Image (tube, rainbow, N blue to C red):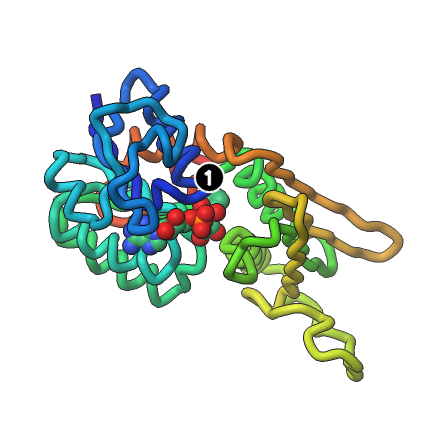
Amino acid sequence: MTRVGVLGAAGRMGRTVCGAVADDGDLELVAAVDPSASGGSLEAVAGVATPAVTVAGGIEELERAGAEVAVDFTVAASALANARWCAEHGVHAVIGTSGLGADALVELAGCFEGSKANCVVAPNFAIGAVLMMRFAALAAPYMEAAEIVELHHDAKVDAPSGTAVRTAELMDEARRGAGASAWPPDPTTQATLAGTRGGTGAGGLRIHSVRLPGLMAHQEVVFGARGQSLTIRHDSFDRTSFMPGVLLAVKQVAERPGLTVGLEALLDL
Ligand code: NAD
């Protein structure tokens, strides 16, 4: 049984991860950390009946409880500090927290390079979303232009989503790798409302972020070419959609030296 601790255990994702780990016969939930719910029972905080686990306020709880793997669904600033602690204390880290930019990934790679612990970071743990990214990369060299529209619930604090940023990177890499022409420049010469054309991702790909109550996590990659268009869309309707990917990473992280970025690496996609 692999001993698992959850960071951000009182959050929307953390609560779901606590339940998924507790229900998995190969894993044991030994620690739950969240300063916003310190001292609370896991049953009261996350609806998970694990009487031995009380929510702790600090990451040191992982060491006290003998956790071998930490799952982090917190906020970007906390996730980086948590990962440094995990690397120093030999605890494998599985990070789903979004908002970690290229600099943070370089820092993470450095932290885990000399550590006996490993790290898996994935902007999206939903297997359907990973396939959507793969399909978008496959299409990228063959269509003239593309834009990405990501849609999330109204409590998401960062924009654009890590999935959208990663999708643009994968699409741009695929296009360059195939020797196709660069993405066409934005034709807009007059934007009467600032921001209307979205943000600029890898290769100049436009990313648009929508935030609305009622949504969970959704993304469309819209390709255009003369006389045709192709739309690739993925929808996560429920946070359980992320759990098979999170559990896969928890079970594989010990076998993946250093830093692994993206669930696609674990799926051999
Ligand atoms: P949330 O706000 O509901 O939960 C975050 C929790 O982290 C809060 O309870 C907060 O108190 C806690 N926290 C903050 N700092 C902490 C620390 N140092 N130690 C322990 N706990 C700490 O957010 P959420 O909706 O659960 O999302 C969490 C993150 O996961 C976000 O960045 C979100 O974008 C990301 N996310 C990723 C995926 C994926 O597949 N990779 C899927 C969904 C959400």
Q: Is residue 200 visible?
A: yes
In this view, the residue in front, 137 or 119, is: 119
Q: Residue at x 77, y 75 (%)?
A: 187
- One can see residue 170 in this view: no
Residue 123 coordinates in the image, percent (x, y): 46, 49
**In the image, what residue occupies the spot 85% across and 50% down?**
228
**Could you say which quadrant of the image residue 81 lies in?**
bottom left
Give the vertical position of 194 relative to 242 (above or below).
below
Say which residue appears at 40% left-offset and 28% top-offset.
47
Percent x, y for residue 74? Answer: 37, 51
Quadrant of the frame with the N terminus: top left
Q: Residue at image x 65%, y 51%? A: 151
**Whole-percent x and y of residue 248?**
37, 30
Q: Is mark 1 within 8 Å of ligand 1?
A: yes
For this rendering, which residue is in front, 71 or 245?
A: 71
**How many callouts does the rendering have?**
1
- Residue placed furthest toward the top: 25
How far across and down, in percent of the image, does residue 12 sit? 46, 42
Q: Is residue 97 left or right of residue 160?
A: left
Is residue 82 found left or right of 63 in the rendered image?
A: right
- The outermost residue toward the right is 227
In this rendering, would 251 be left or right of 153? left
The residue that mark 1 highlights is 125
> Which picture quadrant has residue 91?
top left
* Callout 1 crowding tier (Cα within 10 Å): few <14, some 14–19, many ≥20: many
Nearest the viewer among 2 and 21 is 21
Q: Secondary structure at mark 1?
A: loop
Q: Left or right: 216 with respect to 114?
A: right
Give, as a three-letter code, the residue at label 1.
Phe
